[in-house]
Amino acid sequence: MLKSWKSVEPYLLVTPQTLVFLLFLVFPIATIFIVSFWEFTGYSMTPGFTLENYRNIFTSQVSLATYLNTFKFVGLVWFFTLIIGFPVAYFLAFYIDSLRWQIILFLVCTIPFWTSNIIRMISWIPFLGREGLLNKLLMGIGLTSQPIDIFLFSDFAVVLAMVHLYTLFMIVPIFNSLMRIDRNLIAAAEDTGASGFQVFKEVILPLSQPGIAIGSIFVVTLTMGEFVTVRLMSGGQAASVGYLIRNQIGSLQYPLAAANAIILLIVTLAIIFGILRTIDIRKEL
Amino acid sequence: MANLTRRQLLRTGLAAGAMVTATQCARGTPNNPAPGPTVNTNQTKDVTLRFIGTGVSQINEIRQKAEEDLGFKLEMRALSTEENNQIAITQAGQYDVFDGEYFSLPLVVPSGNLQPVDVSRITAFDQIVPIFTTGQLYDGAKVNSSQGTAPHRVMFLTDQESTEFAPEPTNWATLIPFQYNADTLGYRPDLVGREITSWGELFNEEFRGKTSILDIPSIGIIDAAMVVEALGLMTFGDKGNMTREELDQITQILIEQKRAGQFRAFWKTFDESVNLMSSGEVVLQSMWSPAVTAVKAQGIECIYAPLQEGYRAWGGGIGLSRNLSGIELDAAYEYINWMLDGWVGAFLGRQGYYSAAPENAKKFMSQAEWDFWYEGKAATEDMIDPFGTKLESAGAVRDGGSFNDRMGNVVVWNSTMDEQTYLVQKWNEFVAA
């Protein structure tokens, strides 16, 4: 009796998690997958099987341009979050000794999340806008005579806002892997005559790779599906796949939106798979 | 150091917490202003009518007054036009009363989720402005031959069970109208420096990088059509129902303008258009009437320009869910009759919207208010909106003048085209360009 209970127990323990997983992840994605093959008649969708939605996406110049634009954002945001995030994490891990200060400085990093997206967006206007602080400053010190338009409602603004938002997602995992580096390894490297740069290149960088990989996964997935920031910061003038899907949902074109969502999912998973193939993050876990 | 210490656990937990917060924050819904808080009053009857609608009329003051006068409860949900349509079409069980726009009807009515309104039960139906019934306002008015999804084209159904629009008035209405307005371009006279009299000015190089257009395909495309038609770049068979060739051509023009840097931004919500204008990022753009009012309320000059080519208009009304029956249905009819009785018309009138039964609204407005909003006369006293904000000082005249001057000069309505799917596709192309 007791023995049979023992054998059932793990299954019972895993049941709630499995149910949640099936109900809120597998089931919705399966639904989207099915709907992506349905037919669309202008204002309503009918169950059926058509490849028209996918054919539409693969033959359209717009989806190609939109995906390229999204990749551009992903590349830029990834690059800047990494070159900003890594030094921050490095500083926190190696130069701040007290736990109290590490926590305080971490909280400082979360400041961008203290306000809602819409408020952040509104506050960018008086800062980056044509009559904003930045332009006033540049004109005040004589660097430019005309206000510079590209600060706001441009690709620059989109990347700036996303870097501002997502750098934290890079900092946290990198910090985590930096903290796990055995300090004796660094001491050993120094003892055998390695320069500061060599220590960084031969010891710290390789050992922080899992953190970089996890941070990259966060940043890439968040940016791939992004539409709110893209819309607000570009003033609606730049497209991303997420925004395209949002527009299609808004016009009730659910099957087309579903097909786009499936493709976006596949592309994003492919990128993550690529990252995981390059770097073994199991070391981290 | 490799072992997981309590401190490290704490640190990771903190980071995870930050991450959760962050993902939460990243999911904003800037297009949909949060609905106002719901206040529960003591219920006198058991009926609760659930409304869905756009922010224009899903207002707490209206709900409170209705509950007070009618004795049953209302639940209101303020949504964006797109969400409103989505719920109306796909979630029939979520609402009893659909407060929507006429141009949504070619999408909503085929779903069969609305039941026709029995006109004979509407007491003030004969007082409804003829724009909605026959489409004729007065002899020689431009609105009589206006293009697009004009309300009278989708106002009536052939019979009670039908989902087919009737060309002539019947006893079965899709929506009972209560609000509508004529939209045009708004501009900052202080930054533009001269009078704007034509839609064509939106593409004038003089304002390069300082204009904006509405990023809702069904509305934005009509504004764009007004512009290219005014400039003589294109002519249309029907601006409210373009052919594929016309859509190709107009998208091409829009893309050229976008690439040349004509637009500063596109706006999707009311708030965005107000911010663009009041910050000076944009000096000339398509706007909605209350947005102009909101800019003015900040003490910034803004003109809602009467243009020589005429206005683009929209109209909204109340429709009934197919699910309504018995006592709930009676309550819904009571609400419609109350809505046309004038209090709502006066309330919305003080924000610049027109009432479907203006004569009734007049009973609830002061002579000065009526003269200013409907007659186009100079205000004899300060104009105050229903929320207590001063909109105009004594002596001001409404932009565009009287009701007949404004509504009479409507040349096109917000539209759902036969080529709606293609329009959205082309619009996405424009945004992605």
Image (cartoon, coloured by chain):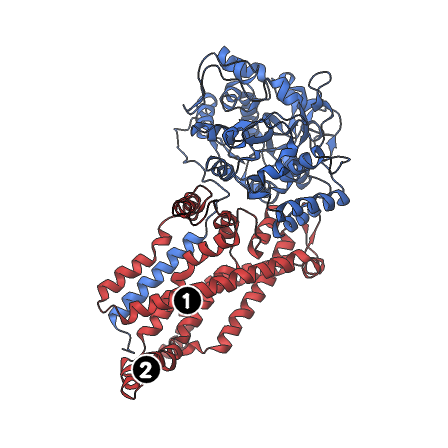
Amino acid type at circle 2 is: Ser
- Asked if both marks, 2 and 1, belong to the same chain, the answer given is yes
What shade has chain A been given?
red
Q: Residue at x 68, y 60 (%)?
A: A54
Asked whether residue A203 is in view, the answer is: yes
Query: Where is mark 2, residue-wise?
Result: A195
Specify whether A91 is left or right of B201: left
- Residue B126, position as x, y percentages in the image: 65, 16
Q: Residue at x 47, y 40 (%)?
A: B33
Q: Nearer the viewer, residue B325 or B260?
A: B260
Q: How many marks?
A: 2
- Residue B158, position as x, y percentages in the image: 74, 30
Chain hosting mark 1: A
Query: Where is mark 1, residue-wise?
Result: A83
Helix, strand or loop at disc 2? loop
Q: Report crowding for label 1: few under 14, some 14 to 19, many 20 or more residues within 10 A (C-alpha).
A: few
In the rendered image, which quarter contains the N terminus of chain B? bottom left
Quadrant hosting residue B12: bottom left
Quadrant hosting residue B289: top right
Q: Single out the mark in the foreground, 2 or 1.
A: 2
Q: Nearer the viewer, residue B206 or B417?
A: B206
Chain hosting mark 2: A
Q: Which chain is blue?
A: B
